[in-house]
Image: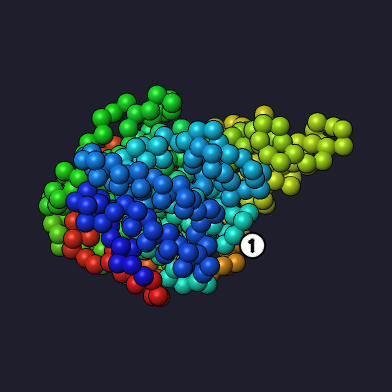
Amino acid sequence: MSSLNHLTAVEIRRRVAAREVSAEEVTRAHLDRITQHEPEIGAFLCTLPARALAQARDLDAALARGDAAPRLAGVPVAVKDVLDLEGVATTCGSRILAGYRPPFTATAVRRLEAAGAIILGKTNLDEFAMGSSTENSAYQLTRNPWDPMRVPGGSSGGSAAAVAAGMAPISLGTDTGGSIRQPAAFCGVAGLKPTYGRVSRYGLVAFASSLDQIGPLARTVEDVALVSSILCGWDPRDATSAKLAVPDWMISLGDGVEGLRVGVPWGFLERGVDAGVLTAFREALSALEGAGARLIEVALPHASHAIATYYILATAEASSNLARYDGVRYGPRRGGGGSLDRMYGDTRDHGFGAEVKRRILLGTFVLSAGYYDAYYLRAQKVRSLIRADFDRAFETCDLVATPTTPTPAFRFGEKTSDPLQMYLADIFTVPANLAAIPGISLPCGRAEGLPVGLQLLGRAFAEATLFRAGHAFQQATSHHQATPPGFA
Ligand code: GLN
């Protein structure tokens, strides 16, 4: 194995820019690593070796001519297969998109490529990003590098496993209710859900449009900050993208946490948190305190309703977004027997998996004429209350800290028969999507030998505070340096 697989994006870029190593060598090292470990991990739905090597060689040639090195020069990136890359299949982990090749590239991916990043391939996920374990993919299982009998989390399970296994220093995920932060926690890597509106969703296949955000996974907060500085920014192609300047977050990264007030919502954490997770969380809080932060208690009185609220709003939006997969505009057409309705029915019955169908049914129900007020409208009101909880908390603190998940990675099959148990894996991550605020998950210790995540939530557009605190935490601890057994 090449030592290049353990370099951070910052270090790869430095060495490529200094021409100590070529982008081609870096790319090859990661492609080799994928070949070596894919049979046991299953992180990728497709790899793009020829495309990646051609990109790397072009970059090397440009640097040889004396061009300035862009900010992600030679940094390999794995992309969740819900983001479009022109001419390359996008499956969303679903049979219904089999054979679909988008004629355009997602803005997020385009920005990374424009900064010199090398796209290695597309990663596995729960079908249409619906799930918490990647077990809902129509194509394959992804295994947690820390324990092959356990899930990597989801829905961005392939992206998290790829970084944990040293296959890519950076990956892109999407987070509608926790799908970046939860798999990052399960796989022992860092993952950011930016503020809603920070990253353009153009070229992202929609799940729940008012909640979806794209964000990076990496080993260090420094890498997360670097990639975010490039990923974020206004895009005329996404009307919900924020017309706000994006700071260079690398500059404020080292500002430390002296005097920063970290709010802990103990009332929300009372029930159902695994003892080992709680121990690691308390130790993480002590480390932040040791670095100069001040701990206070805050209340999030409506957060306990977040899961119920999320599963009304997210399914309502999904039922509308997924109506387009009808065998006409997208999807391998099935059956029909001469009737248009039956063709829609057969195509969707065959193309969608059980979880996606469950959500389309639920979402259609909560939007139906007789039930709209009782469910959808009420959930919108609770969403406002959850947002107001955070507004109030942020009057007294600068960050809110929780464990990212109530338990470490669970075993395959452990929650598949009970969707509600699966949904509860996101109890601590979902509130941030409902409130549209940013959140980061960082490895903060182990429980039963498995990684545990610390989640930090900030005010809308205050990513800088998350990065400062996260970086200070990583300076004070070494959890982010741990590699899964067998992946050193
Ligand atoms: N696990 C949650 C769900 O199944 C969140 C998914 C996500 O963030 N994409 O909806």
Q: In this rendering, is residue 195 above or below 275?
A: above
Locate residue 370: give its quadrant: top right
The quadrant of the picture occupied by the N terminus is bottom left
The residue identified by callout 1 is: 417
Residue at left offset 59%, top offset 54%: 137
Q: What x and y, as percent, mark residue 169?
A: 34, 56
Residue 331 in sight in this render: yes
Q: Residues within 10 Å of mark 1 (few under 14, many from 20)?
A: few
Q: Position of residue 97 (x, y in %)?
A: 63, 43
Position of 290 with respect to 164 (left or right) is: left
The spot of residue 386 in percent (x, y) is: 40, 41
Between residues 467 and 454, which one lies in front from this camera angle?
Answer: 467
- Please give the name of the residue rendered at 51% of the width and 56% of the height, measured from the top-left corner: 44
Residue at the spot 18% in from the left edge and 56% down from the top edge: 472
Camera sees residue 227? no
In the image, 45 versus 186, the foreground residue is 45
Q: Position of residue 257 (x, y in %)?
A: 16, 52
Q: Is residue 50 above or below residue 479?
A: above
Q: Quadrant of the C terminus?
A: bottom left
Q: Residue at x 37, y 61 (%)?
A: 29
What type is the residue that disc 1 sits on?
Answer: Ser
Along the horizontal axis of the image, is 250 left or right of 321?
left
Q: Label 1's element?
A: loop
